[in-house]
Image: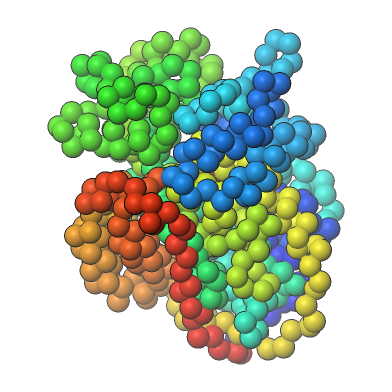
Amino acid sequence: MTRVESLEAPLVVGAGVAGLSVALGLERAVVITSKEMGSTWWAQGGIAAAVSADDSPGAHAADTVAVAGGLAVEDAVAALTGGGPEAIARLIEMGAQFDRDDDGALVLSREGGHHARRVVHADGDATGAEVMRALNAAVDTADTVEMLEGRVVDLARHDDRVVGVVTADGKKRVVYTAPAVIMATGGAGRMYSHTTNPSGVTGEGIMMAGRAGARLADLEFVQFHPTALNAGKDPMPLLTEALRGEGAKLVDAAGRRFMDRYHPMAELAPRDIVARAIFWQYDRGSSAYLDGRSIVNFHERFPTVTAHALSVGLDPSEDLLPVSPAAHYYMGGIDADPSGRTSVPGLWAVGECSSTGVHGANRLASNSLLEGLVFGAKVAHDVDSTPRPAPIGPVEVPGDSLDLPVLSGPVIEDLRQVMWDRVGLIRTGSGLWEARNSLVDMEPILGRTIAGRNAVNLGLLMTMAALRRSESRGGHYRADYPEEDPKQAMRALVVPGATPAERVR
Ligand SMILES: Cc1cc2nc3c(=O)[nH]c(=O)nc-3n(C[C@H](O)[C@H](O)[C@H](O)COP(=O)(O)OP(=O)(O)OC[C@H]3O[C@@H](n4cnc5c(N)ncnc54)[C@H](O)[C@@H]3O)c2cc1C
């Protein structure tokens, strides 16, 4: 028997920067989130925003578009960068403590692809934790937001409308109906064996929307961060881009720099170019290290990186740090506009699970916390100004989400390895077909649980999207088609089709 509970307020799924920003902007909200913390807590480098006198939202927009491989949706970019200064001011008002100089001015870093110092940060490299501390404190004092804990496993529908979610606790299922559902479930980095993303960031929200018939976009575009600490940990600790902004160099084992061979901006080239350069170092039998020894007061300025390095016996002020690329950010996701509207009535999406085209084929560093803050506020406004639907009739949910166990077994690790080997940084047509066939072989076992089913289906969608794009662009690199093809300069949209649903018993 499945319990059905009716909520009067809009329901936000996920409590990272995007979900909490929506919740705080709504007149009333219920937030439901699983125990996993999501990526925001881990964000290091900061939030990009044109807050200095010699910068402007227009210059920030130009940098965002320049790295986006020709696919940035320019209206969305203008909305993002235009909302930056206000979003920072709002966070400061909530109590966020950003790093400041002796005169009290915000200290701004520069990161790859940015032509100005515009990255606001906290505690050196612990920006995400400070953002979450401030947002959670605001939620605690707001009497408009109710927090619930629960693992959402699917969306509930009535006709072609999303009318709620299904949560699972062991075998128990609860259906929550709500006047609007806002997905803010984060990215999909855990689809890869090499990732900076913490557990739980598996793309589940994207697949739930797809199962409800929502249009998905840009599924082939994964951003691989160039510098994760290559010391056998999962997730791989991130060595923030700000290190290179502050002068850290990429070198081989002999201490020779190599990035100037690949791009005029050398270590500050766009992420995809730096990531592939490091990959090719290994491919040629060489290696790659980050040399941050010239950074003054390293330990004080980068305490998170220092702690990660010391935990594997390396001192970043004295040692070279071995680096590898790792899956880091997903440009693909639920097709949405900056107000979060998706192709399905009743369903909004925001943050890393959404794909608004604001990052095009490649995200500019430190634009995603900003996206959660700026678009989160827009979504709240849109949801509150959308007329509430009439009371709904019977609720329908795909039967397998009511019956299957939630968690998957060890085969998921095989899937993550296949995705890294064949759908990773360097792709080829034959490798992608191999990946597709391996995933199809895994499907009978993975399909026995909700997590496995979602992972294998998302893996297949990502693989087929990568196969269809026979060119290289942004985060998607095909060794068999290494050039951009102007004829393919468009976003790719997919409608997986709603999974048949049955009336909740
Ligand atoms: C190591 C690291 C460093 C980064 N550094 C930066 C940076 O410096 N600047 C920057 O702009 N970006 C950075 N990023 C990217 C940025 O952190 C993310 O893009 C952003 O935080 C995503 O926010 P979100 O709210 O969309 O998702 P998340 O913060 O991932 O939150 C997702 C939420 O959804 C919940 N959830 C997920 N699935 C379910 C489910 N099935 N049921 C219920 N709840 C669910 C989770 O519990 C979580 O609360 C970094 C990412 C990583 C991993």
Give the residue drawn at x 67%, y 46%. Answer: 79
Q: How many marks?
A: 0
Give the residue drawn at x 30%, y 76%. Answer: 444
Name the image quarter holding residue 371.
Answer: top right
Quarter placement of the N terminus: bottom right
On the image, the x and y values in percent for residue 198 come to 46, 47
Q: In this view of the protein, can residue 82 be seen by the observer?
A: yes
Give the residue drawn at x 27%, y 46%. Answer: 482
On the image, the x and y values in percent for residue 21 come to 71, 49
Quarter placement of the C terminus: bottom right
On the image, the x and y values in percent for residue 146 come to 76, 58
Name the image quarter holding residue 5.
Answer: bottom right
**Image-based side of 444 in relation to 32, left or right:** left
Give the residue drawn at x 65%, y 25%. Answer: 55
Furthest residue toward left: 285
Image height check: is 248 above or below 492? above
On the image, the x and y values in percent for residue 346 come to 68, 72
**Image-based side of 389 in relation to 271, left or right:** right
**Image-based side of 340 in relation to 270, left or right:** right
